[in-house]
Amino acid sequence: MRNIAMLGSGFIGRFYADSIQGHRNRDRIVMIQSRSEESCTVFAKKYMVAHWATDIETAVAHPEVDTVIVALPNHLHEEAIMACVRHNKAVLCTKPLGRNAAEGLRIMKAVEAAGIFNGYLEDLVYTPKFLKSHQVIASGALGKILWTKSREAHPGPHSEWFWNKELAGGGAILDLACHCIEVSRSFIGKYIRPIEVMCWADTQVKPIDAEDHAIGLVKYESGAIGQFEVSWTFRGGLDLRDEVMGSEGTIWSNGFLRTGLEVFTSGKGTGYMAEKTETNQGWTFPAGDELNELGYNHMFTDMFDSLDQQKPPKETFYDGYIVNAIMDAAYLSVKSKQWEPVLLAEWRGRENTEQENLLTSYDDEHWLIKEELTHYGTQKLILKEKATGRIFERLL
Ligand SMILES: NC(=O)c1ccc[n+]([C@@H]2O[C@H](COP(=O)([O-])OP(=O)(O)OC[C@H]3O[C@@H](n4cnc5c(N)ncnc54)[C@H](O)[C@@H]3O)[C@@H](O)[C@H]2O)c1
């Protein structure tokens, strides 16, 4: 049983609280910290939280608290985590870990030097669809992973600080590509080193200094490419779509919109439909159980089970740091319009992964390019002579 201090009572603090206390459970939020007394007491009443505080230090230091969840704006992550280090409390932090890799690295080093439990709250690698996908990939059913494509696009975040480049640390890349990059790493293999990034970004619609739209390619040492597509300009809800392409198979997944539940309403009597839904009139496509479908339930189960067993969870601050380093390279690439290296001060994965040879020999003299049954009933081979390089067709 964990006694939790929740730092932040906003959008994600409430999602986390709903997941932790929404069902009968043994973990409890015993302290809520928010900027105003009013927000604290509203949250405390709703979630039956015994204590509240308007400052971070008091909340973290409270003797009943053994675990802290950081659900604060990006510019406060480091300050909040350093308080956990001072008071020797286990800490779980929402995404992104830092506003850049330097901040992420300082945070990671501080918690590791203190020896405190750390968990990176990347819920999207814990969705039921992705947990199943990870099993399928681990079984070898997809062969070698060649290309992943991860999209998160919506009409923009809900609080003012996200739109302030200084406080948030960036725009749509920092806010959304952090999800997409970790999702791709989970498919490609987190032990495979990210090498370089090419990224386009622009401010297409919103009157802000940061980017509101970006598309990037992350190249991995295995030869795999992880593509991210992120936007704050998308109209129509929360678009979470992912693809994994391997040498032996493919996975397509739609995480949130049009996943099977379709609701039409004239608009009478409807309130909240689903995250980032732009309308509650006409046809809408709400998720059946947002908490579960976005991965929160499985994520907290892994975090708290790992804490009890004193083992690292699936996602740690080290992962948060790697994601920050990849995003730093993306921002450099946006400026330089070149591939930019991913600079890692710390790498704990595999070194010098060789690119696997996927060529198929047809016989001693030939490579097999393709075998196909045509619509007119012929079995056709496309072969390449190993000695000369000549490509030709053979009908069987
Ligand atoms: N799926 C996810 O993992 C996910 C989704 C949304 C947000 N987040 C992350 O959660 C964190 C919080 O985002 P949110 O959407 O809950 O934000 P929010 O604006 O809804 O809530 C922020 C909370 O922090 C408090 N706060 C304290 N000091 C503040 C300050 N100086 N300025 C603004 N707020 C202050 C606010 O009172 C509020 O309780 C961010 O790091 C964000 O990236 C993660």
Image (spheres, rainbow, N blue to C red):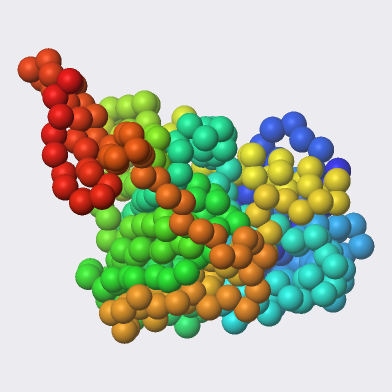
The answer to which of 334 and 370 lies nearer the viewer is 370
Residue 54 drawn above or below residue 298 = below
How many labels, in total?
0
Horizontal relation, residue 17 to residue 101: left or right:
right
Place residue 258 in its image quadrant. top left
User: Where's residue 146, x and y in %?
Assistant: 39, 49
Place residue 381 in its image quadrant. top left
Place residue 320 in its image quadrant. bottom right
The residue under the point 40% across, 45% down is 358
User: Where's residue 177, x and y in %?
Assistant: 43, 62
The answer to which of 331 and 248 lies nearer the viewer is 248
User: Where's residue 255, x and y in %?
Assistant: 42, 39
Quadrant containing the N terminus in the rendered view: top right
The residue under the point 17% across, 20% down is 396
Tell me, yes or no, if residue 91 can be seen here. yes
The residue under the point 50% across, 47% down is 187
